[in-house]
Each structure stands twice: as structure tokens, then as C-alpha cells.
Image (cartoon, grey):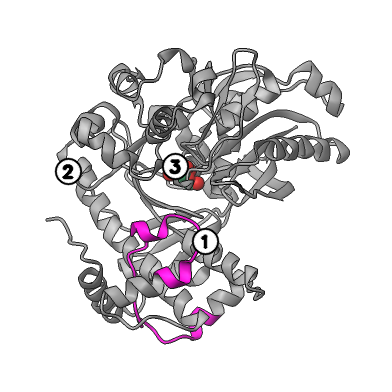
Amino acid sequence: MSILAYDLGASSGRALLGRLTDNKIETQEIHRFSNDPVQVGSRLQWDILRLYHEIKQGLLKAKHQGVQVQSMAIDSWAVDFGLVAGNGELLGNPYHYRDLHTEGIMENMMKELSPSYIFERTGIQFLPFNTIYQLKALKEAGSPLLQQAERFLMIPDLLRYFLTGEMLNEFSNVTTTQLYNPLRGQWDQDLLRAVGISEGLFGQIVHPGACAGQLLNSVSSELGVPSIPVIAVAEHDTGSAVAAVPALQKSFAYLSCGTWSLMGTEVDEPVINELALKLNFTNEGGVGHTFRLLKNIMGLWILQELRREWERAGVTYSFPELVKLAEEAPAFGSCIDPDDPLFLHAGDMLPRIQQYCRQTGQKAPEQPGEVVRCILESLALKYRYVLKLTEQVSSQQFNGLHMVGGGIQNLLLCQWTANAIGKPVWAGPAEGSAIGNLIVQWMAQDVFSSIWEARKVIADSFPVTVYEPEQQEIWNEAYGRFLHVTGLTEYR
Ligand code: LFR
């Protein structure tokens, strides 16, 4: 018997079949597809129906291979949502969190509500695209969609609704809205009032590991497949990725490395205090009532975007080619703070990197290898900075860093991360989110009694590559320059 995990990323999605044999997990990718956000007029939107189509394709492919699927679940990026009308129909396409409609909204809202007021209620970091600011932007724009909306469903909630007809809000994703109060265990009334959104939009919250419905008869007969259960996993991809970290005991640091880099540690209770607020850490809900105390780092987005721009200009590089060019370029030519707001939105990455470098008195990189090297070195150095902050905010010391996610296929980045942090990096598994999705489905079926039992099986099933730190002196010096250029100060 197999189970099916869909993991939707910002630029691609995949469906993995999972099987347990002799307490080892075997996975098989049966479907992979691109996720292409579409710019329509001034709005950047997700092609949600295409994603739903691809989900059906995955079920069909499993059927054509003669695989009996026992259950399925979907995880995706967080914060984005669709609005559903009273007749059950989706109102418009969900906006992409990188759409410009939230510009200035967070800053304006903070004039009315202080950051500590919002943080005390939610424990969530301040990112301009959080759901709370997206809803506020719609409200301020007098969005007719919001006026007609009767239900709010996040991306996996929405796809699950198409499959099962049930409208439920999954916990790990709900926490990322910055509208949920983890101390009270419910949507925060004060914040909903402040945004001007009715509580009626939000549904019952289901936790990872709950059964969240069955495939509708209409869907199973369309596809010719049995009506299987659809499980709520940690439907926030980062929640699933952290569930899959092959750590064997509490107190570990992780870096989930993909379009975003999410670095932090797992905690039993949200850490909501002045320091966490000051350092802009977040407490996102996870599996087994845990929380992810972490920070978003801009991640490989800058490089992915740059590659797309070169492609549009007619020059196509593969990621391995780009990494090779970076390796051959001179070391530490210039650096950036990857989290500068300059790099959040799509487009013009090369001129923006060059602008950042010139403004900070550095030589602007010109050649592709120089630019890519600047991005990857800067990421590794930012990881060192955030790892230090994670130690401070969680009052722990880490003796190494677990890296999971597609970004670990970039071996140079893994090695440079080890060099930058001066500690070993343990890299694997690459399909972290999909594997975390699988194990929570098995937890729902009582195959594993705890996340720790499941992590042990992950550790036994997938190889982990160890990167020992090298060239310490050179990287220490580079870190000093990085702090100077970026103006980042280490908190003491
Ligand atoms: C990673 C991720 C991050 C979230 C960002 C936007 O894929 O889910 O955790 O902050 O995407 O939703």
C-alpha cells in the first residue's frame, strides 16, 4: 500500500508515492510540474486551477501504474489564500504573496497597532506579505471579492476543498496568517476587528494528522479512482520540511533550503518575548503542537529569479552551470544582505544587486560567475548571522546545522554554509517537505506514535551528507566585512 504526498513550491510541484518496507521509507516521484504564477494587468496571481489539474494528474498516474493509494495530502507555501462565495465557488484567483498590493500596508497598520501588540497576540514575524496585510490591502482597496466572500481558505485548504467538498483551515498554515493567537488557540478577535474582517470567514481548524475528508464521489468517478481519505498534514511546506529533519533528539537547528531559506529550531511553546520581537523571529505552528522558532531568509529566490531573467534575455544556464561559474569566480568580490527589501519582488535582480553593491561602496559584480558567487557567499554569511540569533533567542547552543530541501543539491552552498558557520552541516533529505507530508499521513494511521519515531525512520532511510567547515580564517574575515557592509549588528 502506498500513500501520496503533494508538495507545491513557488516554482514547481511534485507528487511522491511513499511506501514503508521493513521500517524504511521508499519514495517514488510520480509527477512533477511547473507552477507558473501569471501576471494579469497589475496583479500577480496563482494559477490555482492548473495546480488542481496537476493534482488530479498525479492521482491518474498512480492509477495507471497500478498503485493502490491509501491516502493523500497536500502541502504548499504559506500565507496565500482564496476566497469562496456563499454558493461554494472560488472568487477570483489567489494573489501571489509577491504581488505589489501589500506595499506600505504593514507600515501603515503599525501606525495604528504597535508591533508588540500584534506580536504578543500571534508570535509571528513581520513580513509585508503576511495574510493579515493582504486582507487589509483588499479591505482598503474595497475589493468586491472580499465583500462577497463567505469563506477564507489557504492554498492547500482550497485544493483539499475542491477534492473533498469540506472547508477546513489547517493549523500550521493558519498560524502564518498573523491573525491566529497560539496562546488562546483561536483566531485573534482583536486583530480581526482591526483589519475589519468578519470571524465568520474562518472555519474549523484541523491539526496535522487529522483526517480532513474523503475524495468526493464526483472526483473519484471522474478519475476512476477509489474515494480515499485526504489527510491534513503540516500543510505549510516549512512545517512538513521541519517534520522531516532527521534529528534524533530535541534542540537542533535546521535550515530548510529552497526558494526561501528558513532557519531556526523547534520549540514546545511559542517564544513570545521582547528579544524575539526585536530580532523578528516567528513561531509557526507545527506537528504535534510544536512551534518553529525561525527566521525567513530570502534564499535561492534571488538566484532563481536571475536565472529566469537571463533566460528571458535568451541565455539559458542550468543551476549546476551557474554553480560552476561561481566556483571559478574570484572569492569575496562583493556581498549583499539577501534580505534587503530590494530583492523581495520579481524583476531586475542584476541591476538591483549592482545598485546595492555600489551604494555600499563595493565593486558591482558584472560577470555571471561573479554575481552568482556574490549571492551564494552572501547567503552562507547570512546563515551564520541568523544561526547566532537563533542560539540567542532560544538560549541554546547548536553543534551543527541540519539542511533539508532542494537547495542542498547545491553542494557548494552546503560547503560554504559549513565554512561560514564554522560547524558541520548535515544535509538531507532533499525532498524534506514531501517526506514530512508522508510521515504525518502515517502518523494519522498510527504507523508512528510520535514525530521522534518517524524522524528515526527518516534518518535510517535517507543518506545524510556531512560537510565539515574549511578555510575558517578566510570566512571569519569575510563575515566581519559582511557585517560592516550590510550594517547588521550582532545582538549581545
Ligand atoms: C517556503 C514558505 C515560507 C513562507 C513563504 C511564503 O516555501 O512557505 O515558509 O514564509 O514560503 O509563503
Callout 2, which amino acid? Leu
Earlier-in-chain disc, 1 versus 3: 3
Q: Which residues are magenta?
A: 325-352
Residue under pointer 3: 101
Q: Is residue 50 visible?
A: yes
Closer-to-camera residue (86/318): 86
Marks 1 and 2, how far apart in space? 30 Å
Dot 3: element: helix
Q: Residue at x 37, y 80 (%)?
A: 364
Closer-to-camera residue (195/464): 195
For disc 1, does the CB lie below 8 Å from ligand 1? no
- Specify the quadrant of the image occupied by residue 430: bottom right
Q: Residue at x 76, y 39 (%)?
A: 58
Q: Residue at x 67, y 74 (%)?
A: 314
Q: Is residue 300 visible?
A: no
Please say if 353 is above or below 212. below
Residue 171, x across and y down, in percent: 45, 26
Residue under pointer 2: 275
Residue under pointer 1: 408
Residue 209, x across and y down, in percent: 54, 25
Residue 347 sits inside the magenta stretch: yes
Q: Residues within 10 Å of mark 2 (few under 14, many from 20)?
A: some
